[in-house]
Amino acid sequence: MKTHKNIDIDIRDRSGLTALSSAVERDDIEMLQFLLSRGAEVREAHLIAIMRGSREKAEFLLNAINRKYGHEKELEGIEDSSAFAPYITPMILAAQLGNIEIIQMLLARKHPQLSSLHIPYCRCQLCRERILTRKSYTEYRRNVYQAIANPNYICTTAEDPFLTAFRLRKRLALEASIDRDYASEYHSLASKLREFSANLVSMCRDNDEVEIVLKEPTGYKDYPGAKVLFPRLQLALEFEEKLFIATPQVQSTLRDKWLRHRIDWSWKSPIDKIRICLLHILFVPLVAIINIFHPALDFVQRYTTPHSTFILHFTSSLIFNALLLTLMLLDMKRKTTGPPETGLEFVIVLFVAAGVFLILCPYAIIMTWLYHNYAGLKSQSPNGETTTQPDGFTTLPNSIFTLFWAVLAQSEPDAANVVTANTAA
């Protein structure tokens, strides 16, 4: 080069690579430093270094770009590269390859994280500009999804890898349903995300760690419903994450919560299981009385497990249906008309009344809590008429009475009215 001073140091070979890019491919550090000292253009050399997994060379070349063109230039792709599309930035390439060291290095150099793409049929100004300015917009979307769906990239950048994987897999399914050309690739990425979330929860060392994961409420607030013990599990059901739910770690945690004091239930013989169920049923009245005075007692806590609750509810339904069937069979054998007189009527009525009471009682408590502060209030209108707060919901017995008649459409129409100011003399 000293002899031929006019030689083009950035000339390309038949494959479109410059001397600097070839030096990166051959791991020739001395040639790399020499060419940069002679003012060689980096072009796609830093992307080749990232593709080969060389963190040191990639950082060295990014420093050269930064010194020559500034920080913004190192964030961009290469317009005239023969090896990489113009939209392939260092972060996209590193994320596609899943190289954690290079991803961390780029983040340390203030390279922005890859943002999620808009839905495929989005027609916002940004998406319209991208469609018009890029000839292969679908290729661009495919490459970005290959990057952000990489498990290593998710683990490096996401605060909640499980939630990120769940949402991204759902988005990939949507992309596959719209972009038929790359549907198989999107389905493949979605399958890998399923396996990723399942493998990630499988790394938990014990059930306590799995329970922490399942109790994470992030993301569940978007789904209305009653408070649940395991919000993340409910979220997995919403996103149809079957592999995540079917992992041995998750199933073991659910089984422990279901059985709690009966861990050995699955090893019991059928006779022992029937004996335990019968004992549960016989002791229910005693447990109900003890629960009033000493709810924290271990004997009482055994009846609060989902397993025990299921046995009690199932048995209650079984007894109720058996009573109805018995009453019906006895009535069919009668040769006279009239109401049945078997003695079972009182028990059936008691079952029904208890069920109605259990349904009405929570609503009655809520309504009483809302209305009790308005009890006795009066207001006077400008024409002198005095309105008194209805007592339909001011006390618990009144609330139960009002709701009962409301079910039969016989309650007072003004029972829910509210007098907000005590203005009467």
Image (tube, rainbow, N blue to C red):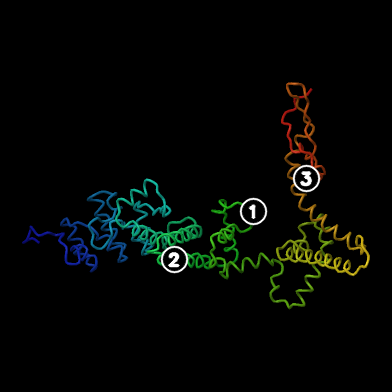
Q: Are marks 2 and 1 in contact (CB under 8 Å)?
A: no
Q: Mark 3 highlights which residue?
A: 409
Say which label, 2 or 1, has the lower sequence index. 2
| Label 3 environment density (alpha carbons within 10 Å; few <14, some 14–19, many ≥20) | few
Q: Quadrant of residue 276?
A: bottom right
Q: In this view, does 395 lie above or below 313?
A: above
Is 226 left, or right, of 127 in this rendering?
Answer: right
* Mark 1: secondary structure: loop
Q: Do the residues labelled 1 and 3 touch (CB within 8 Å)?
A: no
Q: In which quarter of the image is residue 293?
A: bottom right
* Mark 3: secondary structure: loop
Residue 319 - label: none
Amino acid type of the residue tagged 2 in the rendering: His
Q: Mark 2 highlights which residue?
A: 187
What is the CA distance from the residue labelled 1 to the residue labelled 3?
31 Å
Say which label, 2 or 3, has the lower sequence index. 2
- Which residue is at the front of the view, 303 or 70? 303
* Mark 2: secondary structure: helix
Taking the spot 94% from the left edge, 65% from the top edge, the residue there is 336
Q: Mark 1 highlights which residue?
A: 227
- Which residue is at the front of the view, 50 or 382? 382
- Image coords of residue 384 (percent x, y): 77, 21
Amino acid type of the residue tagged 1 in the rendering: Lys
Q: Do the residues labelled 2 and 3 touch (CB within 8 Å)?
A: no
Q: Nearer the viewer, mark 1 or mark 3?
A: 3
Location of the C terminus (image quadrant): top right
Say which label, 1 or 3, has the lower sequence index. 1
What is the CA distance from the residue labelled 2 to the residue labelled 3?
54 Å
Amino acid type of the residue tagged 3 in the rendering: Ala
| Label 2 environment density (alpha carbons within 10 Å; few <14, some 14–19, many ≥20) | some
Q: In which quarter of the image is residue 232?
A: bottom right
